[in-house]
Image: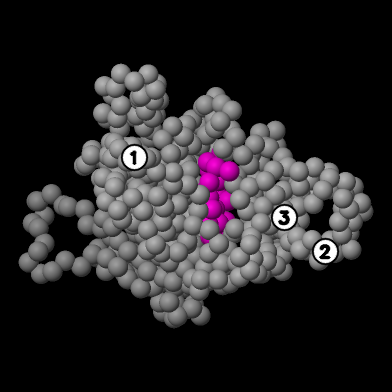
Amino acid sequence: MNVKEIITVENIRYEVIEQLGAGGQGSVWKIKSKSDGKFYAIKILNEADVARRANKIANIRQFINEKLDEKLRDKDVKYGINHVFPVALYYNAATQETGYIMEFVSGKTLSKMLVDGTVAAMNFEDRLKLLKKVAVAVDALHNIGYCYTDISFGNFMYDAKSDVLYVIDCENVTCSAYIKNGQRDFLKGTGFFIAPEVAFGRARVSYESDKYALATLIFCFLTDNIIPSAYHGKAMYSAQPACQDMTEVAEMEADDDIDKNWRFFVFDETNRSNGLDDLCKHSKNPENIAFRKRVEKVIAIWGRMPPSLKALFRKAFDDPFKNNRPLPSMWVREIDNILSPAKAATTNAPTAQAVKKPTAQNSAPAPESGKIAAAPRLSDYEKAREKINKYGSFVPAGARKSPAAPQTAVPKPCLVSSVGKAVALTADETVVEGAPLGLAQKIVGTLKRTGSEYSFTSSLQTAVDVIGRDGSVKSQLCRGQTVMLESGESIKPVLSTVSIRIDY
């Protein structure tokens, strides 16, 4: 492709204006439509492997046919995000060039923002606001059954003027079903964003590897990218030569050339063998002294970080090979709680409905003179709730304490209700069946109690909305994804007209 060259795509002529960049996967050019005068971008793919090239083209075709940009439009507009998907395929029979046309966007990649000092000048709140957009963007893809597969600083672009985050290089986005059969796992990832289980050959890219890369991006962005991963502590830095990505870590471990204590998170609370405490602390080398100052900055940032955010990082990194990392929606919710503590406190407080008292509006109407009013009929839901309120949880005979003894709070049973039907669940882990609740779905998911809280794991192939007590959708789940629930929230399959209410 050359500047001033005229190309034709779907009967529309474009003029090549300039080359915008080039990388391992291809080159990107700015082009101008001869029909409407608008600027677009075209990416020429650089893939020599015939099978992978064919799969990548099939992948791009699927985006265009399914109109993924339209599926994500509402959420993108709401949160100031733009997934820049291919809109047309390009093929030049004479040169064998293959690529795709996409929207032309401008801004800075997160990697550029880190290098030019933009991030260093941002306060903590502004960083969180931007990271929330990243998490929402990944969450939106997961909710429609797609993985990004190559989350890194270079694949998100931010325009500060419009406050829009662009998700670029979307040809790497892949349907989860095709990844599983081995057709479209084009990449393992980038550098230390590669999930350890993928680097070590234990698994393909997946929702889990996306969750690892997202947690790494958030951690490194908040700590100025001073250390390239959550495992870059004493043990990791002892490797010689230094590893350039997670696949090299896997290779060095196979050769017994790296201390296996690298597997501990640098801020692990129980094992400090890979911590930052003594890293270059007593070195007299000028380069090491300068690096130590930067490491101390990471330690200071971690010290000021909200405990709830630290807890999510520990959940993400306490075991490099775990399969229960925080969902993108969990990062979104926690960032919201940090940015709006007053709102979070209100949300977590008992609702008026939970302590509802009779009022003129909800009391039974007064009977006419000389007549006895019929008792109002209770729905199955109300009957079940009344029974729980009246008798509480089941206590084995002989286990009750005397009235004088202090009462120990017992977790209330979970009441699941829908369309006038209700089921009271008391087991710590219960499969939620649709039939008893009047739903067409055979199995909806699993409710699990941890202490006094409940989590829900979806079993449905289609997405599930998690609806807050205020009626808004706080997150969406795909099959196998889990979310913590608050009493009074609802679960609604997107293809269903009814929802399931959870009360405990």
Q: Which residues are magenta?
A: 130-154
- Which residue carries the number 3 mark? 44
340 or 312: nearer the viewer: 312
User: Residue 19: image x %, image y %?
Assistant: 76, 43
Which element carries disc 1, helix, strand or loop?
loop
Residue displayed at 47% across by 41% down: 218
Which element carries disc 3, helix, strand or loop?
strand
> Callout 3: 10 Å neighbours few (<14), some, many (20+)?
some
Residue displayed at 33% across by 45% down: 314
- Asked if one can make out residue 177 in the rendered structure from this viewpoint, the answer is yes
User: Magenta stretch: residue 455 in it?
Assistant: no
Q: Which mark is on residue 132?
A: none
Residue displayed at 66% across by 56% down: 46
Q: Which mark is on residue 240?
A: 1
Amino acid under disc 1: Gln
- Which residue carries the number 2 mark? 94
> Callout 2: 10 Å neighbours few (<14), some, many (20+)?
few
Q: Residue furthest right?
A: 35
- The answer for how far apart the CA atoms under marks 3 and 2 are is 14 Å
Write down the quadrant of residue 232 in the picture: top left
User: Is 295 on the left or on the right of 466, as rendered?
Assistant: left
